[in-house]
Image (cartoon, rainbow, N blue to C red):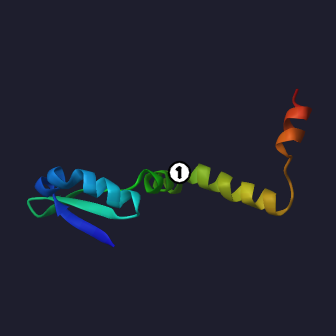
Amino acid sequence: MDKVIGVVETRTKLPQIIKEISLGERYIITQRSKAKAVIVSLEEMETLEILADRKLLKDIVAAKEDIKNKRFKSYEEYFRDNS
């Protein structure tokens, strides 16, 4: 569940907020009762970036399909063939 916190309180509790974010919490930061920002973990941010990149997402889906159908080379095979 997201936690809502004011910008002033954020300043005083930042170390605790960072700890909670690393445990999976998300914070919505408000200023004058209006949501202005969100703090999420680095892992969640990376996931959001991947989901926003349609080409990368298509490449991931294609790679999973290749793995499922055993259409890949091992690390050793790839570098032996390309040396």
Residue 72 position within the rendered picture, expressed as x and y whole percent measured from the top left: 84, 50
**Residue at image x 87%, y 30%?**
82
Q: Identify the image quadrant of residue 65.
A: bottom right
Q: Identify the image quadrant of residue 77.
A: top right
| Residue 24 horizontal side relative to residue 14, left or right | right
**Residue at image x 72%, y 56%?**
62
Residue 38 appearing in the image? no
Residue 41 position within the rendered picture, expressed as x and y whole percent measured from the top left: 40, 55
- In the rendered image, which residue does mark 1 sit on? 53
Amino acid type, mark 1? Asp
| Residue 50 horizontal side relative to residue 36, left or right | right
**Residue at image x 87%, y 39%?**
76
Please, what secondary structure does the residue beneath circle 1 have?
loop
Callout 1: 10 Å neighbours few (<14), some, many (20+)? few
Q: Nearer the viewer, residue 44 or 69?
A: 44
Q: Count the marks: how many?
A: 1
Image quarter in which the C terminus is found: top right
